[in-house]
Amino acid sequence: MAYKSIFKPGLFKDDVALVTGGGTGIGRCIAHELASLGATVIIAGRKIEKLQSTAQEMRNAGYKVDITQLDIRNLDEIKKSLNYIISKHGKLTCLVNNAGGQFAAPASEISPNGWKTVIDLNLNGTWMMCWAAYHAWMGEHGGRIVNITAAARNGIPFMAHTAAARAGIMNLTKTLCVEWAPHGIRINSLAPGTIVGSGMTRYPISVQQTAADNHWMNPSGRYGTEAEVSSAVVYLLSPGAAYINGITVRMDGGRDLSKTSFQRESKIPIYDGGLSVETNELFMKLWGDYKQIGKSKL
Ligand SMILES: CCCCCCC/C=C/C(=O)SCCNC(=O)CCNC(=O)[C@H](O)C(C)(C)COP(=O)(O)OP(=O)(O)OC[C@H]1O[C@@H](n2cnc3c(N)ncnc32)[C@H](O)[C@@H]1OP(=O)(O)O
Ligand SMILES: NC(=O)C1=CN([C@@H]2O[C@H](COP(=O)(O)OP(=O)(O)OC[C@H]3O[C@@H](n4cnc5c(N)ncnc54)[C@H](OP(=O)(O)O)[C@@H]3O)[C@@H](O)[C@H]2O)C=CC1
């Protein structure tokens, strides 16, 4: 069964798209959606098993997919992956910098190396991907880039390192827009709030519980889905977004704007693209309304 995208079939048929962190979660969903619209999608990450398993499910759906193993903190590995993509697939028209992550800890408890690790992964990793894509293909031929960051406008308590890194990416997006638009490159960012799926399940239960407690501060009364992130990414990469450059799309159901709690059920319908989502019992219990997600599993 194909991904249930809202976009026109064949929209990305001439595109070669690289999705970092494409083996799991949000990246996997973006990979499915782009491929369902005709793109050749290359998914990248450190763990080959995750890449192979997502590539297999995509091949089963009849999609054009390839994998490349890389650590976005290692410039040599990035260059090797990009050389491979361009020599095998002929071009690189779309880049989704989705790989990232962090741990939760009070700022006072983050060690110097813990801080460096998260900055290296999120800010420096994203920068190196953009820089290398520019030199390998996009500087000469143009392209579209979307950076996945996080809703960090007001900081993220207990995640000072990632909030600083993500704010850096959002600012980098503005500078690269101005410098690289003359080269035919469009670059935008997308800042999700809490999204149900693999990412959240990787945290200790206490962090998941904190995230779940925040539920009531969200005017939409719920968290987001991987498919809701994906459809915005696909739009930003699409020809319809040709005049959107250098922005960050906040995608948090309005959480950033709310100053009060909302003790009610969500009235905002869920969109899931029909893709199954990795979750766990705690999430199912805390976020019962998400039982709908991935009902028609791919
Ligand atoms: C508060 C609730 C709000 C919830 C909102 C959440 C919104 C965001 C959601 C998401 O982003 S979804 C998730 C995406 N996936 C992940 O984040 C993956 C989980 N994290 C990791 O895999 C790792 O933490 C990492 C960030 C990728 C780093 O892993 P790495 O293997 O490279 O580092 P280490 O060698 O293990 O450690 C380096 C350094 O960092 C210190 N450290 C690691 N974990 C912790 C911890 N839990 N608490 C404190 N410090 C930690 C570690 O001790 C090392 O420092 P030194 O000991 O050498 O000083
Ligand atoms: N889920 C949420 O609520 C939110 C998520 N985000 C961000 O969205 C992005 C995707 O998260 P999500 O899908 O939820 O979580 P996942 O943990 O499922 O995805 C993270 C992906 O990044 C890859 N990755 C991590 N480190 C590296 C690295 N050094 N080099 C290459 N790949 C790497 C991982 O693969 P591997 O381990 O194999 O390398 C994994 O596929 C992340 O940047 C995350 O921080 C932002 C806000 C909210």
Image (cartoon, grey):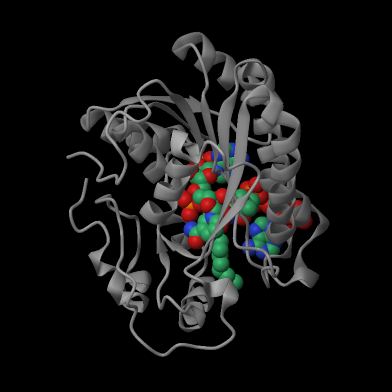
Ligand 1 shown in quarter: bottom right
Q: Position of residue 33 (x, y in %)?
A: 34, 40
Image quarter for residue 269? bottom left
Residue furthest out toward the front: 243
Look at the picture and state if 9 lies above or below 227. above
Image quarter for residue 57? top left
Count of numbered circles on the image:
0
Q: Nearer the viewer, residue 281 or 257?
A: 257
**Left or right: 40 as drawn, with respect to 164:** left
Can residue 25 be seen from the camera position used here?
no
- Quarter holding the C terminus is top left
Look at 62% across and 38% down and name the residue there.
Answer: 187
Can residue 204 be seen from the camera position used here?
yes
Look at the picture and state if 2 lies above or below 39. below
Look at 63% across and 49% down and name the residue there.
Answer: 247
Q: Position of residue 76 (x, y in %)?
A: 68, 22
Look at 24% across and 66% down and name the residue there.
Answer: 292
**Left or right: 78 as drawn, with respect to 228:** right
Q: Position of residue 266 (x, y in %)?
A: 34, 78
- Quarter holding the N terminus is top left
Q: Nearer the viewer, residue 153 or 97?
A: 153
**Left or right: 24 as drawn, with respect to 166:** left
Look at the picture and state if 212 lies above or below 19. below
Residue furthest out toward the right: 112
Q: Position of residue 126 (x, y in %)?
A: 66, 39
Look at 46% across and 79% down and name the residue there.
Answer: 219
